[in-house]
Amino acid sequence: ADGPEEVIKAVRLQVKRGSKVIKIASTGGVLDLTENSSGAEFSIDEIKAVVETAKDYGLRVACHAHGAEGIKRAILGGVTSIEHGTFMNEEDFELAKKYGTYLVPTIIAGKSVSDSAKMPGYFPPVIAKKAMEVGTQIQGTFGKAYKAGVKIAFGTDAGVYAHGKNAKEFQYMVEAGMPPMDAIKTATTSAADLLGLSDKIGSISKGKSADVVAVVGDPLNDITIMQKITFVMQEGKIYTNQ
């Protein structure tokens, strides 16, 4: 979709199809065949049109973005969150704090595609080059964003690495300087806030959905314990109890 009128139509079509969140991409990606994943791909006016239309339906807008300029435009355009944020700079950090924009860093995705790029022939050369660039940058950018005071929510871009490994994101967050409890909150209270669902999920509280996971041990002493979930309850129903 190109231009404000087309993006408005695109949002309305996705709402008609049943979408509960609108996601756009204000820069290129790693796993596409474009030369550069950093270039900005929407104007601020186009992004504003997306956001305003989504708000008409009570929906929030997530934005895939790697490059600093595309991130800047997305924040100024009013998106709720930036997914990846690989090349965020100091200006982006300040804007994210000013507008309350969340960063969903997906460190595990960056590391995973970087590892895959090291295997000869796994990716076409144009993708392998971008994967190596993102993989070496994304964790460091997250650490800087956290220390700058940007709001962080948990997300992993599941699908570009082996399913079931999502909890490694906690480990990578802690390695980058985030305290274990703050890392856990990114996946609970902060994630619920990002989605606008704090009244229903995100904490073990009266009146909220009984969604609970448990581990054997103290993840505040060893965050890798979060990779060994032994109990899972969703809406009061137990699915795993090892």
Image (cartoon, rainbow, N blue to C red):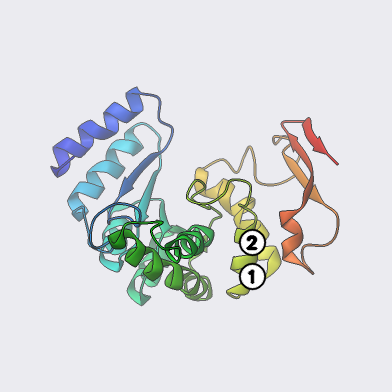
Q: Residues within 10 Å of mark 1 (few under 14, many from 20)?
A: some
Q: Residue at x 28, y 27 (%)?
A: 13
Numbered circles on residues, count: 2
Residue 56, position as x, y percentages in the image = 32, 33
- State the residue in front, 21 or 173: 173
Task: Please state the horizontal and vertical placement of residue 209, each as a whole percent of the image.
Answer: 70, 34
Q: Are marks 1 and 2 in contact (CB under 8 Å)?
A: yes
> Which quadrant is the C terminus positioned in?
top right
**Image coords of residue 169 (percent x, y):** 60, 60
Q: Residue at x 46, y 62 (%)?
A: 110
* Left or right: 178, with 65 as reference point: right
224 w.r.t. 50: above or below: below
- The kind of residue tagged 1 is Val
Circle 2 Cα neighbour tier, 10 Å, few/some/many (<14 / 14–19 / ≥20) = many
Q: Name the foreground residue: 125 vs 80.
A: 125
Residue 145 lies, with reference to residue 116, above or below; the image says below
* Residue drawn at (45%, 63%) of the image: 119
Mark-to-mark CA distance, 1 and 2: 6 Å
Dividing the picture into quadrants, the one containing residue 184 is bottom right
**Please, which residue is most extreme toward the front here?**
120
User: What is the three-letter code of the residue carrying label 2?
Assistant: Phe
- Give the residue pinned by disc 2: 170
Nearest to the observer: residue 12 or residue 177: 177
Q: Secondary structure at mark 1?
A: helix
Q: Secondary structure at mark 2?
A: helix
The residue under label 1 is 174
Q: Is residue 106 above or below residue 173?
A: above
- Give percent across and percent down for residue 241: 84, 38
Q: Nearer the viewer, residue 67 or 184?
A: 67
Quadrant location of the N terminus? top left
The quadrant in which residue 201 appears is: top right
**Left or right position of 89 against 223:** left
